[in-house]
Image (cartoon, rainbow, N blue to C red):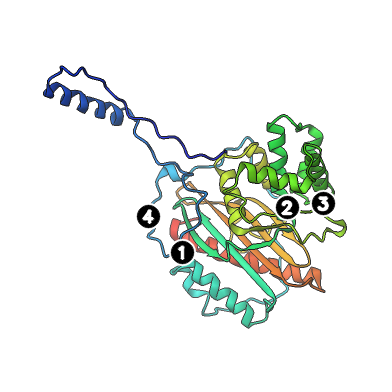
Amino acid sequence: MLFLRSSKPEPNVVETPATLDGSRRAFLARLAALVTTGLGFAPKSDAADGWWDEPPMVTPPQWPRRAPQSWNRPPTRSWSQPPTQPWSPPPTRSWSQPPTPSWARPWTTTDLNATIERYVAHLRQTGRLAGNERTAWLVYDFTSRRFLVTINAGLSYQSASMIKPFIALAFFHKVQEGQLEYTPFHRQRMEAMIQHSDNRATNYFIELLNRTSGRSGPAEAEHTLKRRYPGVFRQTRIVESIPNGGRTYRNRASALDYHRFLQALWYDQLPYSAELRRLMYLPNRDRIYTGATGVPRGTAVIDKTGTTARLCGDMGILVARGRDGRNYPYTFIGIIEKARPTQSYMAWQAARGNVIRDVSSMVYGHLRQMYDLV
């Protein structure tokens, strides 16, 4: 199985004859220890070590004044960031933001998890979230290697189009195994699936997976992912192609599944990791940067949205920039699921998308206080 932890080097062993006196044996033992540590062979902590574990209870962490340089690992990219985005955030929103509500003040100084819980409660009190809607939120800071937010993170929710990067990963595994090829045509279809969320392109790749085994395409996608990464896709269920009209309600995953996928992607632990990051970085109208007034322009975003008449979500990595010139990446997952399909699809998805944007702005503001971000 992939994602075994980095093997720790064995310490050097110096064999000595039994006839050596005690003082010489002690000298050689000290010499062996000196060689092991002095030449850099001592085990070092792995930046990705333990990424598959469940998150601990969220408690207010003690933040370092300055993060060690080794924590600020930029993404490995073979592509360059475009100078400008072809889209811009909307100038106005369809709802008015409260002036300075009591729940908004503590987020600069107190626990972020509790702040978002208060904000969601405020939305319910003011009618911006209905009683038949539930939410999930997860924020993981790569710099401190801590979960800052885990609200309903382990529960299974509808995936909508957020399942599409998982389909891409299953396809790339088949390419790695030599069963399929990644041709220029496939690259175009992959961009259509990820950047433009094209449902026909998605079904095309699901059909390709179907040809590699006796299982159906969705079943083969799930089987491939769980065979390779049983610790990542724990609540993931892929049971259907995208139906006509895009009403896909049966594929499911949890916020933790999305996070573990994104973390493996960040640490190059997936086949075609650089290509997957490129695809998810292509400009699109996301909900964690576009229109999120608290996230500054120029923040890099690797993400995938998902929308149906019952779900509004986004999952991605934001790479914030510090005034010290370092990168401060973190995962952000926001999901809002409705028990029954909405009768006002456009208005509902726009309003819930703005809720996710608000929470994303809160998270960035919290991190700005911690790391002196731009």
Q: Quadrant of residue 208?
A: top right
Which amino acid type is marked by label 3? Asn
> Mark 3, mark 2: which one is toward the viewer?
2
Task: Give the alpha-carbon distance from disc 4 to disc 2, as whole Å.
Answer: 41 Å
Which amino acid type is marked by label 4? Pro
- In the image, what residue occupies the spot 59% across and 66% down? 359
Of the two numbered discs 1 and 3 on the same chain, state the one appearing first in sequence. 1
Task: Give the alpha-carbon distance from disc 3 to disc 2, as whole Å.
Answer: 15 Å
Residue under pointer 1: 58
> Mark 4, mark 2: which one is toward the viewer?
2
- Tell me the tag on residue 238: 2
Q: Residues within 10 Å of mark 2 (few under 14, many from 20)?
A: many
Residue under pointer 3: 199
- What SS does tag 3 mark? helix
Of the two numbered discs 4 and 2 on the same chain, state the one appearing first in sequence. 4
Task: Give the alpha-carbon distance from disc 4 to disc 1, as whole Å.
Answer: 17 Å
- Tell me the tag on residue 64: 4
Which amino acid type is marked by label 2? Ile
| Relative depth, front residue between 4 and 42 | 4
Task: Give the alpha-carbon distance from disc 4 to disc 3, as whole Å.
Answer: 45 Å
- In the image, what residue occupies the spot 33% across and 29% down? 11
